[in-house]
């Protein structure tokens, strides 16, 4: 029984005084591969933002290695890799330059590491291509290359399977499974059917607020 | 124990119910003080040796200027409390204080301009006081506009609080630099803090007016904050109950009169 | 067993952001020229709108050059964080273990190097065009160098507060103007008093103090504002 890494205790997610989710209890131990499921607008992205520390926690707490994430922001961010909907790829820079600054924010990578990571996402040889010339799918794969460069323990991936082809999906699923098996934690959302062997599901429909007014 | 009191202070409902009682005496007091102060100043204080009757506008102008400045600090402190202790009520107070302070600044500038015309022959003078008040107006306007255009209300609160706090550091800097600029360009100046000596028979009505303005400001701030509370807490059960009671009472009054 | 992670030194991310922004700007070189062109053109308008006699121009030259530098800086501020906000880089900055203060400082430094410093260096040309007397040139360049740095710092706060708004230019101007005023007053007067024969050191010292204060406060406030803006 491994130690819990990420714990959600009675967590609630609010947006402008509207409670989207309440009373979430979940514990992720090392090796967790967790899909967060819910209908559109249920609060999946809000939950992921809250877990990443982007949104303030309005109710309950989120613990990482036993301590609240609000009390250990730097240590938590050191172990966190977040990939969202957007593509922080600067068009004027080459693929390698983009990966250099993205990795420098957490754990700097060198050229050799970057070349290897690009091979893994099927972009070998694209190091010096200007990013404005990339297709949407290629841009997403550049971002996914971070998964092979980062040393983060916790991966929070918001719809990582968007805009990549079948081979890419298979490679990504393999990478996620590998990360979980080596003791990391992966939280993700996806609209597509998955062929991964074992993963658990957190269904947000269990945590929707009851209809009606609340007391202040 | 004391923290419990402090956190209760942050409850909008508690504030709303407490101020129900306060307003019953605060509002009439403000009106009375204001009427007495202004009529004393306009009607009974002696004529000034240099400016004749036109100086009387100081009873409206000076307290407005003082309150505009104090109001900015009240707004900034409310913002700071809201940011540090993450409470809702201070942000509501901050948001309410902004338009009141802006209005006071406009009043100051307008009355100052009215004062300037008969006294110095011009409606507008680029002197230290006017510039300072104008800058204060821009500081207020920035906060009012920011509160309006921000898409999310929580974000608007925090953004306005940050802006207000940075502004408080700026207020003494602006005052000092404008004063310095003015002293370089106009040798004879009227100091921002008021003339050197003022006769007691004019001082007392002035002090009374200042007190009246403080009461009036507090009343206005409480009223605006209560409105903000009702707006923001509209979906909570205590507000819905309050609205229902009021509506029932109004219906009872109407049918009662009809009978 | 999770892979061990190294803790990078504090300067790595800082340098990476400076390098990234400088590279991006260098590859879009035309963007750098915009404030400079505005600066030059607007100064040309001055003698055409006002009596172009040397005496008049010399009197108002220090103030006018400072005002134009201020407006040119204002024009360039909207884009300080906008692209990062739009493409999601801002989220990565916030989620980085590197303090957001350093990230903001890195971006401000690049902004100053590519906007404020060129303005300060080109100012003597404008001084010549406006018949600025000889004693004013050095104080003009020095005061503008420090002044534009302060303006970049204050502007970062304004840009951070308004980056999530759609039509942010007007709100940005409204917010920043009161904060810029003392800098304008001190800077313009430093040059005017130098022209009149007094020493410029008093004004420059005041500007230096303002820079120190701005360096301390503005990136912190801007970082807070960025956290707020990024989610909405």
Image: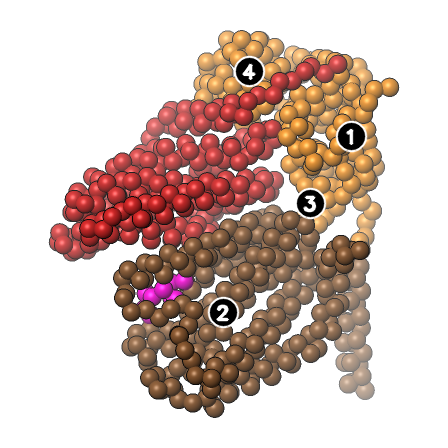
Which residue range is magenta in the image? Answer: B124-132
Task: Give the residue at x 35% y 41%.
Answer: C146
Q: Which residue is mark 1?
A: A66
Q: Check disc 1: other Cα within 10 Å, few if <14, some if 14-19, many if 20+.
A: few
Query: Of discs 3 and 2, which sits in the foreground?
Result: 2
In percent of width and height, residue C29 lies at: 34, 28
Q: Which residue is mark 4?
A: A109
Q: Secondary structure at mark 2?
A: helix
**Disc number for residue B66:** 2
Q: Nearer the viewer, residue A68 or A45?
A: A68
- Counting the numbered discs, the total is 4
Q: Nearer the viewer, residue A151 or A169?
A: A151
| Neighbours of disc 4 within 10 Å: few (<14), some (14-19), many (20+) | some
| Closer to the camera in the image, C90 or A206 | C90
- Circle 3 or circle 4, nearest the eye: 4
Query: Which of marks 1 and 3 precedes in the sequence?
Result: 3
**Residue B38: image location, x then y, percent:** 51, 84
Determine contact: label 3, label 4, CB under 8 Å.
no
Q: Which residue is mark 3?
A: A15
């Amino acid at each position: 029984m491994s130690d819990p890494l990420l714990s959600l205790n009675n967590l609630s997610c609010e947006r402008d005084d509207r409670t989207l989710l309440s009373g979430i209890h979940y514990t992720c131990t090392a090796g967790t591969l967790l899909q967060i499921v819910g209908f559109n607008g249920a609060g999946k992205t809000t939950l992921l933002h809250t877990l990443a520390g982007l949104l303030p926690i309005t109710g309950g707490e989120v613990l990482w290695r036993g301590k609240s994430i609000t009390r250990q922001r730097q240590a938590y961010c050191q172990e966190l890799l977040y990939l969202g909907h957007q593509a922080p790829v600067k068009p004027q820079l080459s693929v390698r330059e983009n990966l250099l600054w993205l990795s420098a924010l957490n754990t700097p990578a060198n050229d050799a590491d970057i070349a290897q990571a690009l091979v893994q996402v099927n972009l070998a040889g694209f190091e010096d291509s200007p990013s404005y010339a990339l297709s949407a799918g290629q841009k997403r794969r550049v971002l996914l290359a971070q998964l092979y460069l980062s040393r983060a323990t916790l991966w929070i991936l918001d719809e990582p399977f968007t805009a990549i082809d079948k081979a890419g999906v298979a490679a990504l699923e393999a990478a996620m499974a590998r990360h979980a098996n080596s003791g990391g934690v992966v939280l993700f959302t996806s609209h597509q059917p998955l062929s991964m062997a074992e993963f658990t599901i957190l269904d947000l429909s269990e945590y929707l607020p009851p209809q009606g007014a609340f007391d202040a | 124990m004391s923290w419990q009191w402090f956190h209760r202070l942050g409850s909008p409902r508690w504030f709303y119910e407490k101020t129900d009682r306060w307003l019953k005496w605060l509002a009439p007091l403000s009106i009375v003080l204001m009427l007495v102060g202004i009529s004393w100043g306009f009607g009974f204080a002696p004529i000034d040796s240099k400016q004749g009757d036109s100086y009387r506008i100081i009873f409206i102008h000076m307290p407005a200027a003082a309150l505009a400045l104090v109001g900015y600090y009240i707004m900034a402190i409310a913002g700071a409390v809201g940011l540090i202790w993450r409470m809702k009520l201070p942000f509501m107070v901050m948001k309410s204080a902004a338009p009141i302070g802006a209005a006071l600044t406009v009043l100051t500038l307008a009355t100052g301009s009215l004062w300037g015309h008969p006294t110095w022959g011009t409606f507008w003078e680029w002197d230290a006081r006017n510039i300072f008040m104008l800058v204060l107006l821009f500081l207020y306007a920035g906060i009012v506009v920011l509160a309006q255009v921000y898409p999310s209300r929580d974000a608007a609160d925090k953004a306005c609080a940050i802006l207000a706090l940075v502004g408080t550091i700026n207020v003494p800097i602006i005052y000092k630099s404008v004063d310095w600029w003015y002293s370089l360009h106009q040798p004879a100046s009227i100091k921002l803090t008021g003339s050197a000596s003022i006769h007691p028979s004019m001082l007392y009505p002035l002090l009374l007016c200042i007190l009246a303005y403080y009461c009036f400001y507090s009343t206005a701030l409480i009223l605006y904050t209560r409105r903000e509370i009702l707006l923001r807490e509209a979906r909570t059960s205590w507000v819905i109950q309050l609205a229902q009671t009021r509506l029932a009472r109004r219906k009872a009054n109407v049918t009662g009169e009809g009978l | 067993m999770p892979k061990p992670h190294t803790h990078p030194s504090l300067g790595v991310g800082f340098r990476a952001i400076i390098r990234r922004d400088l590279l991006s700007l260098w590859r879009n070189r035309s963007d750098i020229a915009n404030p400079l062109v505005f600066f030059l053109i607007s100064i040309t308008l001055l003698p055409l709108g006002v009596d172009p006699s040397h005496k008049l121009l010399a009197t108002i030259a220090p103030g006018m050059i400072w005002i134009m530098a201020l407006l040119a800086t204002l024009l360039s501020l909207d884009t300080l964080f906008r692209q990062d906000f739009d493409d999601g880089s801002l989220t990565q900055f916030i989620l980085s273990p590197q303090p957001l203060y350093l990230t903001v400082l890195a971006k401000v430094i690049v902004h100053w190097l590519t906007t404020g410093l060129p303005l300060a260096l080109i100012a003597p040309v404008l001084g010549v065009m406006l018949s600025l007397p000889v004693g004013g040139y050095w104080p003009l360049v020095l005061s503008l160098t420090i002044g534009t740095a302060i303006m970049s710092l204050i502007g970062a706060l304004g840009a951070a507060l308004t980056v999530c708004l759609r039509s942010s230019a007007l709100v940005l101007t409204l917010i920043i103007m009161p904060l810029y005023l003392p800098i304008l007053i001190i800077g313009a007067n430093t040059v005017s008093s130098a022209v009149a024969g007094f020493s410029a050191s008093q004004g420059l010292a005041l500007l230096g103090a303002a820079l120190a204060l701005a360096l301390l406060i503005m990136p912190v406030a801007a970082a807070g504002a960025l956290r707020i803006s990024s989610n909405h």
